Structure formats: C-alpha cells, structure tokens
Image: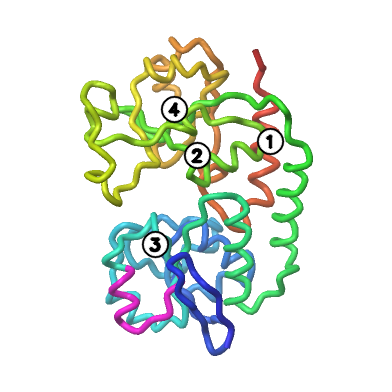
C-alpha cells in the first residue's frame, strides 16, 4: 500500500502504484504524463491540453468545474486527481462517495507544489529522485539563492471588467516572489460585496463573509495606480490578454509585458522550466 495525506487531511492510498488515473486538473495531468507516461491516464478534462500531441487520445470527462461523474466512475480508475479550488466540491464529493480513490490537492506556494509533486510520485510508484522532480527542486533552490534584495513591483490581472487579481495566499503570488517580483496586491484581500471591493460601499464584517474565498480581489485602475507597480504582467489564462487590452492599461505609464499563464498558475513538474522562464522574463523588464 502506498499512501499520502492530501489537502483535506485525508490519507489517500492505492494497494499498488496507480495505473489508471483520471486527472481533473490540467497541471496534474501534465505531471502524470511527464512522470509516468500518457498511457496511465484513463481520463482528463477538456482543459487538460498538455502534453500537446499526445494527450488528445485520452478520453474527456467534462470541464474542471463540471465533471461528468458517471463517466469518471465508468472508466474504473484506481486514482482520481482533483484540486480544492479548480474542481467543484459537489463533484469531488460524489466521486469519493462512489468509492473511488480521490486525491485532493491545494498547493498555494512553490514549496507546497514541490511537496505535491513528491506525493504524486509516491502514488505513481515513481522514485523521488526522478529527473523531472529533481530538476524542479534544483530550479527552486537556485531561485532562492539568486533572490534580489529589491524585487520588481508588479500588477498581474487575471480578469477584466472589473479588473481582478490575487493576493499573497496564492501559488501565483508566491512564484512571483521566488522569481524576483513583488505582487503589489499581496496584502489586499477581496471584500464583499463587489461594490465594497471596488471602493464604493462599506465591506461586510468578517463574520458575514464566512468561508468565502477572499484571495482574489476586484480592483479599480485608480487603486492599481495608487499601488505604483513597476510593470504589469499580462497572462494568457485564465483570461487571455492581448494587444487589444493595452490601451486600457497604458495610462499606468509602466511596461506591459505578456507572459504565459501556465508558468504563473500551473504547478507540478512544469516548475523545472517555469521558474527559470519567469526569472528570465522579470530580469528583462527595465527597472525604475
């Protein structure tokens, strides 16, 4: 029996290394393919698009937010990979209630993402010194060693109308810090209701917010300007920013730089390449 503890504090294990895996998380699908081959993937979501050219043969079981539970069960997987944020709670609970082995992840830092990858390797029966895992760990160590004392201050929108970003309690914010940037909204939680988030109404007290996610604030451009970023990074997911969005942000008077959303938001074995890519990108941006 191989077992690990998942993000819900549950002990998750398989009698033998998992051979039929349904992954409901794009970055985890990619990690399984890199660590043990696409052949072990019995199912994926329509957003699981890597590794391109090989993943297309794997059956689709819905989207990340709306899983076809019966289709997953019919595939008879010996392991289902889910994420606390990306997948709907009701779907994940239905898969658990159906008797499937479900591992739920929720890494909110690079260190936690590396720990997740090691847990995945255990479930797959892959050595913890596998080349992809070792390279990701080495990239993390090198980035820590090379940290600058004065990071580049960045604003990273993930949506618009209204603008939306993330605070320090997210994986994206942590990988930016590791690679030499400071998220100017690191200390800004989301307020409820929306009018309060946009500064036009008083926010609800904490007890009325309850367990709602406050890591993704909506912000007006005036607030962005007041936080004085040195640059704006424009990812291509979850919202695909393009040249058409440049005129809205040009009044900030700082460099506008397009970047890969996968490098910012996908964890797992991708870290071995995304960390050096982000470091190189940030180093290329002129500093004030």
Instruction: Name the residue that disc number 3 marks.
Output: 45
Circle nearer the N terminus (2, 4): 2
The reply to whether the C-beta atoms of the residues labelled 3 and 4 are less than 8 Å apart is: no
Residue mark closest to the camera, 1 vs 4 = 1
Q: Quickly name the residue at label 4.
A: 242
- SS for dot 2: loop
Q: Which residue is labeled 1 in the image?
A: 279
Q: Residue at x 36, y 58 (%)?
A: 64
Q: Going from the N terminus, do you reach mark 3 or mark 4 first?
A: 3
Give the mark nearest the N terminus, 1 or 4: 4
Residue range corresponding to the magenta coloring: 92-103
**Label whose residue precedes the other's in the sequence (1 or 2):** 2
Secondary structure under the numbered disc 1 in the rendered image:
helix
Q: Position of residue 110 (x, y in %)?
A: 60, 50
Q: Look at the picture and state if 97 lies above or below 156.
A: below
Q: Give the Cα distance between marks 1 and 3.
A: 30 Å
Disc 4 packing (10 Å; few <14; some 14–19; many ≥20)? few
Residue wearing tag 2: 168
Secondary structure, mark 4, is loop
Question: Marks 3 and 4, how far apart in space?
Answer: 25 Å
* Mark 3: few/some/many CA within 10 Å (<14, 14-19, 20+): many
Q: Are marks 1 and 2 in contact (CB under 8 Å)?
A: no
What residue is shown at x 54% (from left), y 26% (from top)?
A: 154
Residue at 39 percent of width and 55 percent of height: 85
């Amino acid at each position: 029996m191989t077992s690990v503890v998942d993000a819900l504090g549950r002990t998750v294990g398989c009698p033998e290394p998992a051979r039929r895996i349904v992954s409901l998380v794009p970055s985890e699908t990619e990690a399984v393919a890199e660590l043990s081959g696409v052949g072990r993937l019995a199912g994926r979501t329509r957003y699981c698009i890597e590794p391109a050219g090989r993943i297309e043969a794997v059956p689709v079981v819905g989207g990340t937010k709306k899983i076809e539970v019966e289709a997953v069960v019919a595939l008879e997987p010996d392991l289902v990979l889910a994420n606390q944020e990306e997948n709907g709670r009701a779907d994940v609970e239905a898969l658990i209630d159906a008797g499937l082995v479900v591992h739920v992840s929720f890494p909110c830092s690079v260190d936690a993402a590396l720990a997740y990858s090691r847990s995945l390797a255990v479930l797959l029966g892959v050595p913890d010194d596998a080349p992809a895992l070792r390279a990701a760990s080495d990239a993390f160590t090198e980035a820590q060693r090379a940290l600058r004392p004065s990071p580049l201050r960045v604003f990273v929108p993930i949506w618009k109308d209204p603008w939306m970003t993330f605070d320090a309690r997210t994986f994206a914010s942590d990988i930016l810090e590791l690679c030499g940037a400071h998220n100017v909204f690191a200390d800004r939680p989301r307020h409820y209701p929306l009018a309060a988030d946009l500064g036009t109404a008083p926010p609800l007290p904490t007890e009325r917010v309850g367990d709602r996610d406050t890591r993704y604030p909506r912000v007006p451009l005036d607030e962005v300007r007041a936080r004085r970023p040195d640059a704006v990074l424009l990812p291509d997911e979850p919202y695909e920013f393009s040249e058409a969005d440049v005129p809205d942000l040009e009044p900030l008077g700082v460099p506008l730089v397009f970047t890969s959303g996968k490098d910012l938001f996908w964890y797992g074995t991708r870290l071995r390449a995304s960390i050096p890519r982000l470091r190189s990108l940030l180093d290329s941006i002129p500093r004030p």
